[in-house]
Image (tube, grey):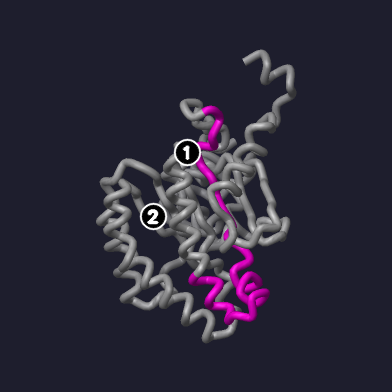
Amino acid sequence: MSKNNSAPVNAKNNGVPRHIAIIMDGNGRWATKRFMPRFAGHAKGVKTINKVVNACIDRGVEYLTLFAFSSENWRRPPDEVSLLMQLFRKVLIGEIKQMGERNIRLKVVGDLSKFDKDLQTMVHNAESETAANTGLTLTICANYGGRWDIVNACNKLVASGVKQEDITEEQLSANLAMAYAPDPDMLIRTGGEARVSNFLLWQLAYSEYYFTDTFWPDFDGKALDEAIESFQKRERRFGKTSEQIRAQ
């Protein structure tokens, strides 16, 4: 088992998950429902990120990981992809100062080699500027895929001299893109879909899943509280029986 899989819930905050991962789904459908262009939904979704980040800080969440752009999203219409990249740039430029004021550490994980050089530089600079912050760690998964993450970790181990047959779960976990964070306690997916869509496949092995019909632009602090309340009612077993858990 990965050393991160049994990372404890934040006991100081009445069972609030230490690490929440979110698949932000439903931006386009939110806009279409209002007879607006799909991009308007993405722009509204960025504002929702700010609200949810603040809500997580207020509730004592230590890690928030957002699935912003999957490796499959390149298949979207070119105009939509171009607008998403422009929005990403705008966020990086406009939010860094606020991240410093809110003591947020920013991490961006994924195969960034497919992004324009200037965007790669902006990501690097944003991470560097917030690296010393000690509050919430906000991770943006961009051009990310869970399968890519696992294959990439295996390739790094083999390149370092580890024989393929000698690779252990602990070694693989330590070479994943998010080795700096505990595995998510809870996955939230908005927008009514009930699947993980190639997101954090290794890290979500023992996470609690919460699916909601709420589109991401409508997700707020109240919706987050409902998800956390659902999480708090569950008994996390990590493969153990109830008797084993009670005996601990």
Q: Is residue 85 above or below residue 196?
A: below
Spot occupied by residue 93 in the image (x, y as percentages of width and height) = 31, 68
Spot occupied by residue 195 in the image (x, y as percentages of width and height) = 70, 57
User: For residue 230, what is the image quadrant?
Assistant: top right
Q: Could you tell me which residue is drawn at 42 percent across and 43 percent down?
A: 57
In the picture provided, is 111 more to the left or to the right than 204? left
Residue 34 on the magenta span: yes
Magenta residues?
14-43
User: For residue 113, what is the image quadrant?
Assistant: bottom left
On the image, numbered disc 2 is attached to which residue? 107
Quadrant containing the C terminus in the rendered view: top right
Quadrant containing the N terminus in the rendered view: top right
Q: Is residue 221 above or below residue 155?
A: above
Front residue of this view, candidates 117 and 214: 214
- Select label 2 or label 1 by which is in front: 1
User: For residue 23, what is the image quadrant?
Assistant: bottom right
Q: Could you tell me which residue is drawn at 52 percent across and 71 percent down?
A: 42
Spot occupied by residue 65 in the image (x, y as percentages of width and height) = 49, 52
Is the residue marked by circle 1 packed among few (<14), some (14-19), or many (20+) residues within 10 Å? some
Q: How far apart are marks 2 and 1 (CA)?
A: 21 Å
Residue 157 on the magenta span: no
Which amino acid is tagged 2? Lys
Front residue of this view, candidates 161 and 86: 86
Which amino acid is tagged 1? Arg
Q: What element carries label 1?
A: helix
Residue 157 shows in the view = no
Spot occupied by residue 182 in the image (x, y as percentages of width and height) = 49, 40
Front residue of this view, candidates 163 and 106: 106
On the image, numbered disc 1 is attached to which residue? 59
